[in-house]
Image: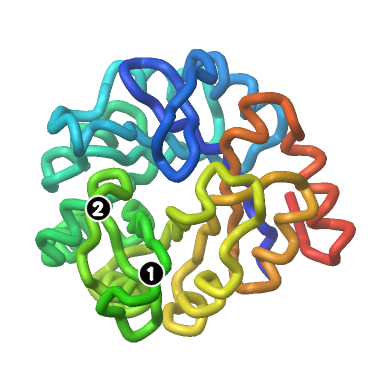
Amino acid sequence: MTAVRVIPCLDVDAGRVVKGVNFTDLRDAGDPVELARGYDAAGADELTFLDVTATTGDRSTTYDMVTRCAEQIFIPLTVGGGVRTVADVDRLLKSGADKVGVNSAAVARPELVAEIAQRFGNQVLVLSVDARRVPAGEPGTASGFEVTTHGGRRGTGICAVEWAARAAELGAGEILLNSIDADGTKAGFDLEMLAAVRAAVGVPLIASGGAGEPAHFPPAVAAGADAVLAASILHFGQTTVAEIKEALADAGHEVR
């Protein structure tokens, strides 16, 4: 049994960490470098850094901030947001990222997944899937879960489960599955969506969106997650990395 990883997520906009609900109404949560250093000291297993307006604002990820974060921490750093090309991945890795998250650009051109994996190895590539439940009355996808792009603003009509499976075949080393509906609600992870994707992919699966308390994390792992992501409940001091790990351990899951 592999230990469950606990991963704080820093959503960054214009150089500050922000957090919203369902990807909107963003509010300030602090300095990314300070938060990164704090989470490393607090026992986080990895850190994810998402430039949340890089795709919608059509600008590159803030490389200098990645470098400053990487210099301060000793745990793996995944960076995503606005990654469109193999050259973007190369620059992020040279800036200090250990892994790179790709979302909208891979949906637009799935070959990008294979190109990145072939150049840098599967272990570098995290496919970020922002998925939502298809509302009743809308033309559905096979699973009832649809891929969205541009920070959850655009529907694609693509089945999230099928897309995760295809991306894993193309070379994605991990799937970061983020529920748009649960994001920031603190009502718990979308366990049905996690279980559906887990059944379709063999690569590690990261659960994201909806964590409100330590008790929400063990069910996500039981549904198939290999790692769990948390943002606002950590940034605003509602819980700690240690409390999340304690809840996981109490439920019988191995933690580091």
Q: Nearer the viewer, residue 83 or 171?
A: 83
| Number of disc labels | 2
> What colour scheme has been applied to the protein in the rendered image?
rainbow
| Residue visible at 40% across and 41% down in the picture | 23
Is the Cβ of the residue at disc 1 closer than 8 Å to that at disc 2? no
Which quadrant: the N terminus?
A: bottom right
Q: Is residue 107 above or below residue 70?
A: below
Query: What residue is disc 1 on?
Result: 135
Q: Please indicate whether residue 240 sits to the left or right of residue 176 in the image.
A: right
Quick check: 94 above or below 132? above
Any mark on residue 164, and which? Answer: none
Q: Earlier in the sequence, mark 1 or mark 2?
A: 1
Measured from the top left, where is residue 129 in percent x and y?
35, 59
Which amino acid is tagged 2? Thr
Q: Is residue 83 left or right of residue 213?
A: left
Q: Say which element carries label 1.
A: loop
Q: Callout 1: 10 Å neighbours few (<14), some, many (20+)?
A: few
Foreground of the two, 117 or 14: 14
**Which residue is at a point 46% across and 39% down the rendered structure image?**
48
Left of 174 or right of it: where is 146? left
Secondary-structure class at tag 2? strand
Relative image position of residue 16 (x, y in whole percent): 42, 17
Identify which amino acid the numbered label 1 is placed on: Pro
Q: Which residue is mark 2?
A: 149
Residue 217 screen position, x and y as percent: 71, 56
Q: Quadrant of residue 66?
A: top left
Residue at the spot 79% in from the left edge and 54% down from the top edge:
215
